[in-house]
Image (cartoon, grey):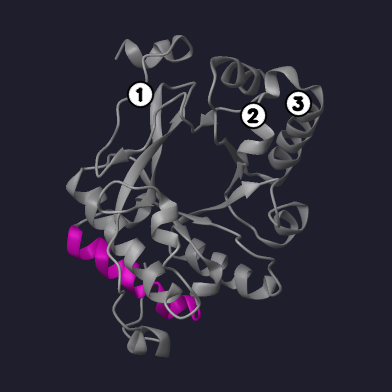
Amino acid sequence: MASTSSQCEACKSAQPLSFAFTMAFQPIIQLSTATVFAYEALARGIDGSGAGSVFKHVNADNQYKFDQTCRIKAVKLAAELAIPCYLSINFMPNAVYEPERCIQTTLKAARDNQFPLDKILFEFTEGEEVLDYEHIQRIIHHYRSQGFLTAIDDFGSGYSGLTALANIDTHIIKLDMALVRDIDTDTTKQAIVRHSIAMCRELGRQIIAEGVETEAELACLAELGIDLFQGYYIAKPGFESLPAINQSPGLEAFHRQ
């Protein structure tokens, strides 16, 4: 993978964070093979408190440093835990100024911790409306050129919709939990997801269903054609650890391993 040693001004001028945090890891499973496809790194307070306790400290002045620190912590912990699959790291597009240079922190963390670069997946999260799709696509294009997998998070919620899908060429989309919730009894959601699957297949993109909480939701989504899943029905995030897959009827193949 190509790299450059130079840094952008944000890298040079970023001040240390005034708050501490760590990571939890939640599995994304592939049902057909009964394997863990990836573990998503999720920010947590050092006392185990939820992401909200961390993000309340993040603002426009420190979001760049926070984004970079998240990457370092995620890679370091993933290496310590010997994650054998993909590591999924969320990134905030507004915290990436020059993708060629801002990626250097991730590359260095991977090298320092001997974590394979080809096992990193970046999830693009939209907390606010995207006004510069060219900038986002430039980030995604550079990440792809470096060999990273890329994903749009929370597809179908907020600003992450068809316009993002048309303008941001990621490998994967993650269906928002709002589309997943009670899908087994909601024919409208079933129709939306069915057509989303067909559309993504035509575009050559994989789908992950996130926020799966019941066996019925999992079964319905699997019948519709989804094979990658994440949610409390599968496993809750493990605080600085890799949680076991739940002993649930719909996950019997995992129990036999």
Q: Quadrant of the N terminus?
A: bottom left
Asked if one can make out residue 86 in the rendered structure from this viewpoint, the answer is yes
Q: Nearer the viewer, mark 3 or mark 2?
A: 2
Q: Residue at x 69, y 70 (%)?
A: 133
Crowding at label 3, few (<14), some or many (≥20) Cα neighbours within 10 Å?
Answer: some
Mark 2 falls on what kind of element?
Answer: loop
CB under 8 Å between discs 3 and 2: no
Q: CA distance from mark 1 to mark 3?
A: 26 Å
Crowding at label 1, few (<14), some or many (≥20) Cα neighbours within 10 Å?
Answer: some
Mark 1 falls on what kind of element?
Answer: loop
Q: Main secondary structure of the magenta part?
A: helix
Query: Residue 45 location, x and y as percent?
Result: 31, 54
Asked if one can make out residue 2 in the rendered structure from this viewpoint, the answer is no
Q: Residue at x 45, y 63 (%)?
A: 56
What's the mark number on residue 148?
none
Q: Quadrant of the C terminus?
A: top left
The amino acid pointed to by label 2 is Arg
Query: Residue 201 location, x and y as percent?
Result: 69, 38
Quickly name the residue at label 2.
181
The amino acid pointed to by label 3 is Gln
Quickly name the residue at label 3.
190
Q: CA distance from mark 3 to mark 2?
A: 11 Å
Quickly name the residue at label 1.
245
Q: Read off the magenta span.
A: 97-113
The image shows residue 119, relative to residue 256, as above or below, that is: below
Would you say residue 14 sits in the magenta stretch?
no
Q: Residue at x 49, y 33 (%)?
A: 230
Query: Residue 242 location, x and y as percent?
Result: 27, 36
Tell me if 40 is positioned left or right of 178 in this view: left
Would you say residue 106 sits in the magenta stretch?
yes
